């Protein structure tokens, strides 16, 4: 299989690389890697869509949505497909990734970001949540790393801890929901979410990843309607 680099960026967080996998047969696959670690690709994005489905299905009226992590845009695409959604803030820390989406380096990016309901903010998700007012969002989705036990960036560990999760709860409407994507099951994350939220669920999602059967995990946490 041939691998061709499409774009590369360097920042204080390290190296971000977009490359194509060109198999002998079948379509070309676009792949995103951070510091050499696989993040996601265009071949398997069912779990990113499932993340959106789980969040949007957890609340009755998901009008205002916060997505932590732009990635290759598949979660955002699924959120925007729900006509109940009126506004989506997407927080992405890597400006290069946003640029690749806007300029068509990621081919479906311009169409996706042209939706007037979507606003992309280049910032750290911790900062963005800390600046959000109470009851700002109906739904928050977090897909900013590979989960608490497979961190790409060690600084992201704080988003799985109680102080940050309490701040997320504050910016949710009563009855609102947080859904977190993880590459592996995490009993610690379940326990931490239960310290903060009123209802917590864990869901395995089977995927086929580069000819391997794997499972990704979704963690859904809700605020009680009367909270």
Image (cartoon, helix red, strand yellow):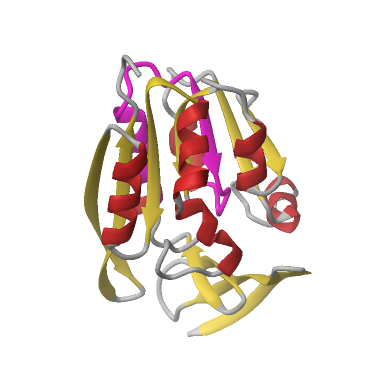
The foreground one among 139 and 112 is 139
Q: In this view, does 219 lie above or below 32?
A: above
Q: How many labels does the image show?
A: 0
In the foreground, 79 or 133:
133
Position of 146 with respect to 189 (left or right) is right
Check if residue 176 falls in the magenta segment.
no
Residue 70 percent location from the top left of the image = 58, 48
Q: Residue at x 35, y 50 (%)?
A: 192
Quarter of the image holding residue 26?
bottom left
At 25% across and 55% down in the image, what residue appears? 205
Q: Is residue 59 left or right of residue 40?
A: left
Q: Give the range drawn in magenta.
A: 48-73
> In this view of the protein, which residue sits in the foreground, 46 or 146?
146
In the rendered image, residue 23, in percent from the top left (x then y), is placed at 45, 78
Q: In which quarter of the image is residue 209?
A: bottom left
Closer to us: 1 or 125: 125
């Amino acid at each position: 299989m041939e691998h061709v680099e499409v774009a590369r960026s360097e920042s204080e967080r390290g190296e971000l690389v977009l490359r194509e996998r060109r198999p002998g047969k079948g379509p070309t696959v676009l792949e995103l890697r951070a510091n050499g670690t696989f993040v996601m690709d265009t071949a398997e994005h069912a779990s990113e869509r499932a993340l959106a489905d789980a969040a949007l299905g957890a609340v009755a009226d998901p009008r205002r949505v916060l997505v932590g992590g732009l990635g290759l845009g598949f979660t955002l695409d699924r959120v925007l497909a729900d006509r109940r959604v009126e506004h989506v803030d997407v927080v992405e820390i890597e400006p290069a990734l946003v640029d690749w989406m806007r300029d068509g380096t990621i081919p479906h990016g311009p169409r996706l970001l042209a939706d007037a309901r979507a606003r992309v903010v280049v910032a750290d998700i911790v900062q963005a949540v800390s600046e959000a007012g109470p009851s700002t969002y109906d739904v928050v989705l977090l897909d900013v790393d590979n989960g608490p036990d497979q961190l790409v960036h060690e600084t992201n560990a704080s988003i799985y801890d109680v102080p940050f999760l309490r701040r997320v709860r504050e910016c949710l409407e009563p009855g609102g929901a947080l859904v977190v994507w993880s590459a592996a099951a995490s009993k610690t994350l379940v326990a931490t979410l239960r310290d903060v939220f009123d209802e917590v669920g864990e869901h395995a999602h089977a995927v086929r990843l580069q000819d391997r059967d794997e499972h990704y995990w979704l963690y859904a946490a809700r605020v009680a309607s009367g909270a």
